[in-house]
Image (cartoon, helix red, strand yellow):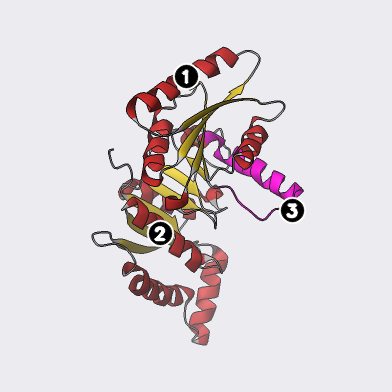
């Protein structure tokens, strides 16, 4: 099967979880045989300029300099952990984080963006239905502590009237790499149930005619909330990954957090957005 991912980008923030996030990103890059890009953007604001001026007057090391030293340590540590032939790139930028990340994605042919809860830094994701969020040329994976690609056994893929072929291609690629089963899910509405079922049937036939991946077909009644229905189904089948369209990513993540808050759960279900 054609290799789908070549360059993974992880924006880094130098918080308490930063090194853990990089370790997970190295793991993903090794499993998918990709180059790994780490990007830290220092926001330029009047306050940050003032603080740097004060630090300079007091002879205190500038934050940017301290970060450079940490980056050098990471370069030494993590470059050795990547498999032979894979490269680690670490870049520091100053400016607006959303703009710099978007520019980096375009200029470095990024295939997958790894993110935690800071997706709002990207233009087009403050409003999930924004058109710029519907025309992505890269996948977005929300990282979770328990996600390990070689241990993915259940992938949930909602099928609707929107074009699903690229999502299907990515799901099949990951399922083949990890030996996972794919659950095709049609979320019914009263007006469009027959259309949803026909698209699920097409997806099923594509998978069965071209792969030996185990496939499960399910229909869900969305009730009052399609996102909640999908998340609950993912929990029921112990899904390791849900693959969705970019325009529903933030909606699904918000619904996910609400459900976990109600149940006092600390777990997180990884979501991969593919255009």
Front disc: 1 or 3: 1
Disc 1 residue crowd, few under 14, some 14–19, many 20+, Cα 10 Å: some
- Disc marking residue 264: 3
Residue 215 drawn above or below residue 101: above
Question: Which comes sooner in the sequence, label 1 or label 2?
Answer: 2
Badge 1 element: helix
> Residue 85: within the magenta?
no
Write down the residue under mark 1. 201
Q: Residues within 10 Å of mark 2 (few under 14, many from 20)?
A: some
How crowded pointer 3 is (Cα within 10 Å; few <14, some 14-19, many 20+) is rated as few
In magenta, the rendered stretch is: 247-269
Q: Any magenta on residue 253? A: yes
Q: Earlier in the sequence, mark 2 or mark 3?
A: 2
Q: Position of 47 compared to 228: left or right?
A: left
Q: Position of residue 116 (x, y in %)?
A: 54, 54
Q: Is label 1 or label 2 in front?
A: 1
Q: Nearer the viewer, residue 15 or 41?
A: 15
Kindly check if marks 1 and 3 are in contact, taking CB atoms under 8 A apart as contact: no
Residue 255 position by quadrant: top right
Q: Identify the residue at image location x=54%, y=79%.
A: 54
Q: Position of residue 119 (x, y in %)?
A: 53, 49
Q: CA distance from mark 1 to mark 2?
A: 35 Å
Q: Quadrant of the N terminus?
A: top left
Q: Disc 2 to disc 3, how far (Cα)?
A: 29 Å
Label 1 and label 3: CA atoms lie apart by 37 Å
Picture coordinates of residue 61 (x, y %)?
47, 82
Helix, strand or loop at label 3? It is: loop
The vertical placement of 267 against 233, above or below, is: below
Q: Which residue is mark 2?
A: 27
Res 39 visible: yes
Most common secondary structure along the magenta stretch: helix
């Amino acid at each position: 099967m054609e290799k789908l991912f070549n360059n993974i980008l992880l924006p880094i923030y130098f918080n308490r979880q930063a090194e853990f996030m990089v370790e997970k990103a190295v793991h993903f890059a090794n499993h998918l045989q990709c180059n790994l890009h780490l990007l830290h953007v220092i926001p330029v604001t009047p306050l940050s300029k003032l603080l740097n001026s004060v630090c300079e007057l007091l002879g205190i090391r500038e934050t940017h300099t301290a970060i450079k030293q940490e980056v050098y340590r990471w370069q030494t540590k993590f470059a050795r952990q990547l498999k032979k032939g894979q490269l680690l790139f670490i870049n520091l930028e100053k400016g607006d984080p959303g703009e710099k990340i978007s520019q980096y994605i375009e200029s470095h042919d990024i295939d997958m963006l790894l993110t935690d809860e800071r997706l709002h830094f990207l233009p087009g994701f403050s409003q999930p239905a924004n058109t710029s969020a519907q025309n992505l040329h890269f996948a977005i994976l929300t990282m979770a502590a328990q996600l390990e690609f070689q241990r993915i056994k259940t992938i949930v893929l909602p099928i609707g009237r929107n074009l699903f072929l690229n999502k299907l291609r990515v799901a099949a690629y990951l399922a083949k790499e990890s030996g996972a089963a794919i659950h095709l899910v049609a979320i019914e509405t009263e007006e469009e149930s027959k259309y949803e079922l026909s698209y699920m049937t097409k997806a099923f036939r594509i998978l069965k005619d071209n792969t030996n991946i185990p496939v499960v077909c399910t229909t869900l009644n969305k009730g009052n909330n399609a996102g909640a229905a999908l998340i609950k189904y993912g929990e029921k089948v112990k899904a390791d990954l849900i693959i969705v369209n970019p325009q529903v990513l933030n909606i699904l993540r918000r619904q996910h957090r609400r459900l976990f808050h109600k149940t006092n759960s600390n777990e997180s279900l990884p979501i991969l957005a593919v255009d």
